[in-house]
Image (cartoon, rainbow, N blue to C red):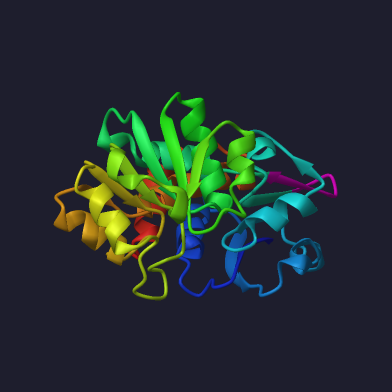
């Protein structure tokens, strides 16, 4: 049996196992996928190898250290410098980022988006900012502190800390929360003053957190934004990871099986 997992801290909330295992079951594959709580990301690659995993997903806060530890990095992940998928290939650990493409697929339902505000500056934010830039969408990154903004500035992506951001003169089609604010708490990803000013002028709001109405989405909804949580992003990035795990193109039947698994059906 081939073994797969998701590394994270926290990871108890993850629905990736039920989604991936549903795909394995649908194709009658001899494979299993489990949660792996990892507090210290320094040991990620060692644990991947030691446990003889054939592949893995990586969630917060380990995406950037997983990039550094990989033997080979492919695709847009080379620019993002953060990965969410590991594959064992010829005794090498090969890394990919499927978050970026999964996000684009998830926001298709919003229609034509020209300007995006991205809250946060971690591994997920890097993926989303670069893939939006590749689509010629105007993206601005807003983070609590300046320390993590060099990456974005080096890629010619506008980025500001809360203190430096003139939010009163900016208008966005879509506002995205890529932070963990609201995952295990009732926090907002930015001050209420900033968010109220922005969301009162935006049309759409997206939260990478899935399975709950976060404080961010609730606030966006109160300003009549069309809202969406991260379930579709999780599904589509998971489908892309599944294809890497199985070397199989996922057709609509596999995707629907994985969606049902994600929903616990």
- Location of residue 213 with respect to 227 vertically, above or below: below
Q: Position of residue 96 (x, y in %)?
A: 65, 43
Q: Which stretch is magenta?
A: 88-95
Q: Residue at x 28, y 27 (%)?
A: 112
Lateral position of residue 253 relative to residue 131, left or right: left
Q: Position of residue 251 (x, y in %)?
A: 44, 37
Residue placed furthest toward the right: 91
Quadrant the C terminus occupies:
bottom left
Lateral position of residue 125 relative to residue 218, left or right: right
Q: Position of residue 241 (x, y in %)?
A: 57, 46
Residue placed furthest toward the top: 136
Quadrant of the rendered image containing residue 110: top left
- Location of residue 132 with respect to 226 vertically, above or below: above
Pick the residue in front: 21 or 168. Answer: 168
Quadrant the N terminus occupies:
bottom right
214 magenta-colored: no
Lateral position of residue 255 relative to residue 214, left or right: right
Q: Residue at x 58, y 71 (%)?
A: 9
Pick the residue in front: 63 or 142. Answer: 142
Q: Is residue 60 visible?
A: yes
**Magenta segment main secondary structure:** strand
Q: Is residue 244 visible?
A: no
Q: Position of residue 127 (x, y in %)?
A: 55, 42
Pick the residue in front: 75 or 64. Answer: 64
Q: How many marks?
A: 0
Q: Residue at x 69, y 51 (%)?
A: 86
Lateral position of residue 86 relative to residue 178, left or right: right
């Amino acid at each position: 049996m081939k073994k797969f997992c998701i590394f994270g801290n926290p990871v108890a909330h993850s629905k990736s196992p039920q989604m991936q295992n549903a795909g394995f079951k649908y194709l009658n594959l001899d494979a299993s996928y489990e949660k792996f709580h990892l507090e210290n990301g320094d040991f990620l690659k060692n644990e991947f190898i030691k446990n003889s995993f054939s592949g893995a997903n990586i969630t917060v806060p380990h995406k950037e250290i997983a990039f550094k530890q990989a033997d080979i990095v492919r695709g847009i992940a080379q620019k993002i410098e953060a990965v969410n998928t590991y594959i064992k290939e010829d005794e090498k650990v090969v890394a990919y980022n499927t978050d970026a493409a999964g996000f684009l697929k998830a926001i298709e339902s919003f229609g034509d988006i020209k300007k995006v505000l991205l809250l946060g500056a971690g591994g997920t934010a890097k993926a989303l900012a670069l893939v939006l830039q590749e689509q010629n969408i105007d993206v601005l990154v807003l983070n609590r502190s300046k320390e993590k903004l060099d990456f974005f500035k080096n890629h010619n992506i506008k980025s500001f800390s809360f203190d430096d951001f003139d939010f009163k003169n900016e208008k966005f089609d879509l506002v995205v929360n890529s932070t963990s604010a609201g995952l295990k708490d009732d926090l907002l990803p930015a001050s209420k003053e900033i968010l109220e000013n922005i969301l009162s002028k935006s049309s759409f709001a997206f939260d990478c957190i899935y399975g709950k109405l976060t404080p961010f989405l609730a606030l966006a909804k109160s300003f009549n934004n069309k809202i969406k949580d991260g379930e579709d992003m999780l599904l589509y990035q998971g489908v892309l990871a599944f294809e890497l795990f199985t070397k199989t193109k996922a057709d609509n039947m596999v995707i629907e099986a994985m969606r049902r698994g994600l929903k616990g059906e």
